[in-house]
Structure formats: structure tokens, C-alpha cells
Image (cartoon, helix red, strand yellow):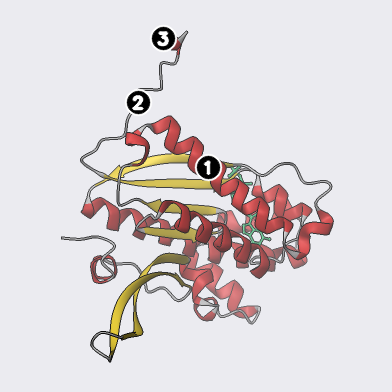
Amino acid sequence: MKDCEIFSNLKAPCSSRLVVRMDGRNFSNLAYRLELEKPYDRIFVKIMTDACLDFFKEFAPGFIYIFSDEVNVLLDYLPFSGRVEKINSVFASFISSAFTRHLLNSKFCADLQDIKPISFDSRIIPLDNLGLVEYFKGRQNEAWRNCLNGYAYWTLRIKYGKEEAVQILDKREKQGLHELLYQNQIKITEVPSWQRRGIAIYREKIEIEGYNPIKDKKVTSQRFKPYLDCDLPIFSGDFFYSKKIIKE
Ligand SMILES: Nc1nc2c(ncn2[C@@H]2O[C@H](COP(=O)(O)OP(=O)(O)OP(=O)(O)O)[C@@H](O)[C@H]2O)c(=O)[nH]1
Ligand SMILES: [Mg+2]
């Protein structure tokens, strides 16, 4: 029967770095059932980032980028010998469990009777250094589109039904959306940076003061701590190289 496990030998190439992208399954329905604030719910975002901090501590990736129900993990190493089935299944189940744990500890825990078990899908994207920068720029553009559309959609929903709002959105140019929001007192370029540009987790160097009893003097040492960055710049090569997320 082992012969039937035909995908078990499928391996990611060891010459590239890997991004694993996970996405919450049917989270539109979850948002509806939990009555999340629209377009952004701070408690939902905290549950997502807390789950990702658990992930960061467990698997020590180089970088995590989060927006909406999407988690992008950049790995510094090849886990599970690069076995695709193993990486996808372990990572997606870990993030689903971590998310569920934080959901149960949140104010939503009283409303969970009608909630189906949480799941995330997962896919692997092998990339070289140039591809990595382009990839994360692309995901950040998607976060921005998501922000613009989210605000525009929920502004339209005040006056229009679901289908009508979608139809109006489909017809409007990007500039038209800015104007629509502006007329409704929303300056989209001034909403919090984490809504426009997403959130990241990476290692930040910190200095720790200590004491060396042999030399009888104060010493400083350097440690790396996971850092939750809610005020990201627009992604560029500079960002990834200066933070040592990508090395030359
Ligand atoms: N109200 C609210 N909804 C959110 C928030 N973050 C994510 N969502 C919801 O999550 C959905 C994520 O989009 P998708 O991944 O395309 O939709 P999905 O329903 O998860 O569909 P699949 O991923 O294909 O299973 C959005 O459409 C929102 O409905 C939030 O902060 N507030
Ligand atoms: Mg989803």
C-alpha cells in the first residue's frame, strides 16, 4: 500500500527559499457569524497575530507577513526535508489550532456554538531573492486593494444592498473609490498603517545589560526577539536587506 502514497516523495527544491502562504477557509462566513467589525476588527486581527507569534516561536521562520485572513511565512531553512505534504499539512494545522486557541480566549468565546471548526489552506512557493521581494510587494499591493475595497464596500452597504454595492464597486475606477470615501469623510491614505500595509513579524536585535562577576563589570550582549511590526513601510528590496530577512 505504501506504493499508493504517490505524493509523499514530492519535495520542494532545496536551492530556493520557500514561502508558505496560508489562508483562512470560509472566513467571510466566520466574520458574519462572529459579527466582526467592518472592514477591520481589532480583536480578530489580534487573534491572527497571536496565532502567528505562536507559529514564529515554534518554527522560527525568517519573516511572517499578515493581512486579512492570510499568513505568508518565509522560511530560512528547508523543514521536513522539503516534503510538500508534510509542510502544508503541519503548518496549516498548527495555525488553525493556534487561531482556535486564541479565539477561545477572546471575547468571542461565548458566541462559538454555531462556529464550524477553523481550517486554513496552505501552499508552497519556491523563490529566489529577487522573486521574494517581488512576491511580498505583490502581497502588500493586495493588502492595499483589500483595504480600499473593504472601506468602499462597507460605505456603500450603508445605502445599498449586497449585490448593488458589488455592482457599483465593479464599475468604479480606483480614483472613483478614493472620491467616494472622501465624500463619506474617510481619508483612506490616513487610516492606520496596519490596515493599508499589513503586519509583519521578524527578528529584531536587542541589547541586554548584564554583569560579568569574573571581570567585575557591566557587559552588554545582543539577543534577537520576535518583533510585531504594525507600522510597515511600503516594501522594497531595501527593507528586506536592511532587516537581514534576505541576505546577499
Ligand atoms: N468584518 C471583518 N471581516 C474580515 C476581517 N478580516 C478578514 N475578514 C473576512 O475574511 C475574508 C477573507 O477573504 P477570503 O479569504 O477571500 O474569503 P474566504 O471566505 O475566507 O474564502 P476562502 O479563503 O476561499 O475559503 C474577507 O472577505 C472578510 O469577509 C476583519 O477584520 N473584519
Ligand atoms: Mg480565506
Please, is residue 116 above or below residue 179 in the view?
Answer: above
Q: Is residue 148 left or right of residue 85?
A: right
Task: Please state the horizontal and vertical placement of residue 221, each as a whole percent of the image.
Answer: 29, 79
Is residue 245 shown left or right of residue 158?
left
Q: Quadrant of residue 101?
A: bottom right
Q: Which residue is mark 1?
A: 92
Q: Regarding mark 2 in the picture, which secondary structure is present there?
A: loop
Earlier along the polypeptide chain: callout 2 or callout 3? Answer: 3
Instruction: Please state if 208 lies on the left or on the right of 17 as rendered.
Output: right
**Front-lying residue, 26 or 126:** 126
Cα–Cα gap, marks 2 and 3: 14 Å
Residue placed at 73% from the left, 56% from the top? Answer: 104
Disc 3 element: helix
State the separation of the CA atoms marked 1 and 2: 18 Å
Residue kind at label 1, given as amino acid type: Ala
**Reading the chain from its start, which is encountered first: label 1 or label 2?**
2
Residue nearest the viewer, comparing 215 with 66? 215
- Name the residue type under label 3: Asp
At label 2, which amino acid type do we have? Leu
Pair 3/1: label in front: 3
**Decide: marks 2, 3 in contact (CB < 8 A)?**
no
- Image depth: mark 2 or mark 3 in front: 3
Q: In the image, what residue occupies the spot 49% across and 43% down? A: 91
Q: Nearer the viewer, residue 113 or 76?
A: 76
Residue that carries the numbered disc 2 in the rendered image: 10
Spot occupied by residue 194 in the image (x, y as percentages of width and height): 51, 71
Q: Mark 3 sits on what residue? A: 3
Graded by Cα atoms within 10 Å as few (under 14), some (14 to 19) or many (20 or more), the crowding at tag 3 reads few
